[in-house]
Image (cartoon, rainbow, N blue to C red):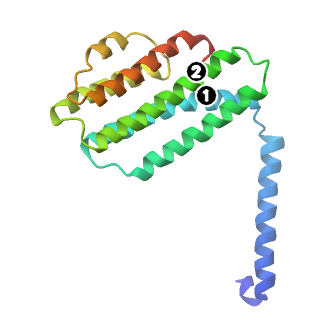
Amino acid sequence: MASLTLDETIAITLRIVYLAAAVAIVFVVNRFFFPMRKETQFRYNFKALFRLNNSYWDIIRDGLSKETRLSVSNEILTYFHMIYQECAAYIQKNKSLPFREDREAVLLKLWHMFSELEQMHFLVRTKSILQEERKALIHLIDAIQEELYPIISYENFPAIRGELRYEEPEVVYVLEQYLKHAESLLAYKHCIPF
């Protein structure tokens, strides 16, 4: 109501000043009252990359039964690459980080896996999965999600590989590549902060 009696330029100036004050207050509170150490943020981001893999599998699962919006996959891709860049920058900046080379390798494998998820989403959207193959793919997605996060284990990988029977060779190839990279993460289990 007060802005109705003020001059327009004064009202706009006050809004900008209030916005700047709010940003400054949030910065001060976050910086001094709720600080987050860079190492803690790195660990959280590293875990988030695995969670995003599972989330993308959920999008693919949904795509088997209904049309998925590209904006959702675009959002998750943007988020993945943003977090990936933060993790890579942290590793590059901290030369004395334990298991530095191994963590770089894990990041690269996660990037490959996410690329394969993009390809899988494309194959689902282009109806490359036959109707009778969908139930098997849903079972495969469940097994992969169980193996990958929150704990990487080897229990289902041999059985999962045995179930890769799809008419489209591209589907088999993408799933084989994804499983190869996921399985190779087992060698780096010691440096993955779960």
User: Considering the image in quadrants, where does the N terminus appear?
Assistant: bottom right
The residue depicted at 30 percent of the width and 12 percent of the height is: 159
| Most foreground residue, 54 or 165 | 165
**How many numbered discs?**
2
Q: Please indicate whether residue 166 sits to the left or right of residue 108 in the image.
A: left
Horizontal and vertical percent position of residue 121: 36, 39
Rendered location of residue 46, percent (x, y): 61, 28
Whether residue 50 is visible, yes or no, is no
Residue shown at the point (47%, 28%) measured from the top left: 113
Asked if disc 1 and disc 2 are in contact, CB closer than 8 Å, the reply is yes
Amino acid on which the number 2 mark rests in the picture: Val
Q: Which residue is mark 2?
A: 106
Q: Spot the residue most to the left.
A: 132
Q: Residues within 10 Å of mark 1 (few under 14, many from 20)?
A: many
Image position of 147 (left or right of 43)? left
Q: Position of residue 48 (x, y in %)?
A: 56, 32
Q: Nearer the viewer, residue 21 or 81?
A: 81
Above or below: residue 108 compared with residue 84:
above
Amino acid type of disc 1?
Phe
Report the residue at 20% width, 28% height from top: 167
The residue located at (60%, 11%) in the rendering is 190
Mark 1: secondary structure:
helix
Q: Tell me if mark 2 has few (under 14), some (14-19) or many (20+) residues whose alpha carbon lies within 10 angstroms of its own.
A: many
Question: In screen coordinates, is 41 left or right of 118?
Answer: right
- Give the residue pinned by disc 1: 46
Say if 109 sits above or below 66 in the image. above
